[in-house]
Image (cartoon, grey):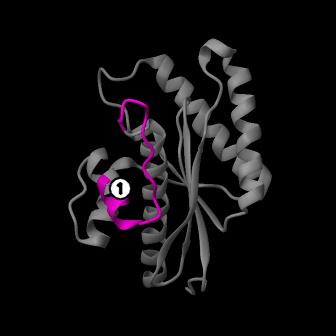
Amino acid sequence: CVFLIMKTILGLDISSSTIGWALLRVDERDIVLHSYGHIKPPKSKDGSLSHRVNSAYSELKTLFSDIDPDCVAIEAYANKFTTGKSNSRTIIVLSVFNELSALASLRSIGIEPSRYSVISIRSELSKYFNTKIKSKDDAFDFICKYFDNFELRHTRNGTIRKECYDEADAIAVAICHFIRSQLLCQKD
């Protein structure tokens, strides 16, 4: 298995309110945060689920076409529900947004995204970087420390904007894909 000299990985953290994205440039040794951002689908009060999904799909297709990554990785949605924290409507809506993201990738750049569970993402980062990442906050703190160019933005109250967490999660997804790709190369 030959790892590309420079490869781009687009990581996505998907929800119905914010889709965080991050583009990493990687080779055998270096992981560089090239760019990141987020997409804000319309809120449920602004239209039907079909309207919201259509808007997100259009923005994602544009993102995929503009970035044209070598790989796309998304967080697997089925593994992240805790009893009592999500109802069936939430699960259905999140599933729809997750699948539309995969469809936008497939239709616009011909790439079926790789999917990783939250537990796998934290585990891979912990092992690869020899640090303990057990929670969403641990992962966020790690991303903030590892990437000098990851900028924290604050609300008027001085709290960190929610979108920063979504973008950091997208970075973690992309890093997990990089680690898993390297492991596959080592096995070949």
Question: SS for tag 1?
Answer: helix
| Residue for point 48% across, 70% down | 178
Q: From this view, report whether residue 103 is shown above or below residue 184.
A: above
**x then y, percent, for residue 158:** 36, 36
**x then y, percent, for residue 12:** 55, 50
Span highlighted in magenta in the image:
141-159
| Residue for point 65% across, 46% down | 102
**x then y, percent, for residue 32:** 50, 72
Going by the image, does 126 lie left or right of 111?
left
Q: From this view, report whether residue 174 is shown above or below residue 153.
A: below
Circle 1 packing at 10 Å, graded few (<14), some (14-19), many (20+), is some
Count of marks overlaid on the render: 1
Whether 142 is among the magenta residues is yes
| Residue for point 67% across, 64% down | 69
Residue under label 1:
120
Going by the image, does 71 lie left or right of 105?
left
Q: Residue furthest left?
A: 132
Q: From this view, report whether residue 76 is shown above or below residue 47.
A: below
Q: From this view, report whether residue 99 is shown above or below residue 145.
A: above
**x then y, percent, for residue 138:** 26, 52
Going by the image, does 184 lie left or right of 128?
right
Residue 54 visible at all = yes
Q: Relative to the observer, which residue lies in front, 26 or 159?
A: 159
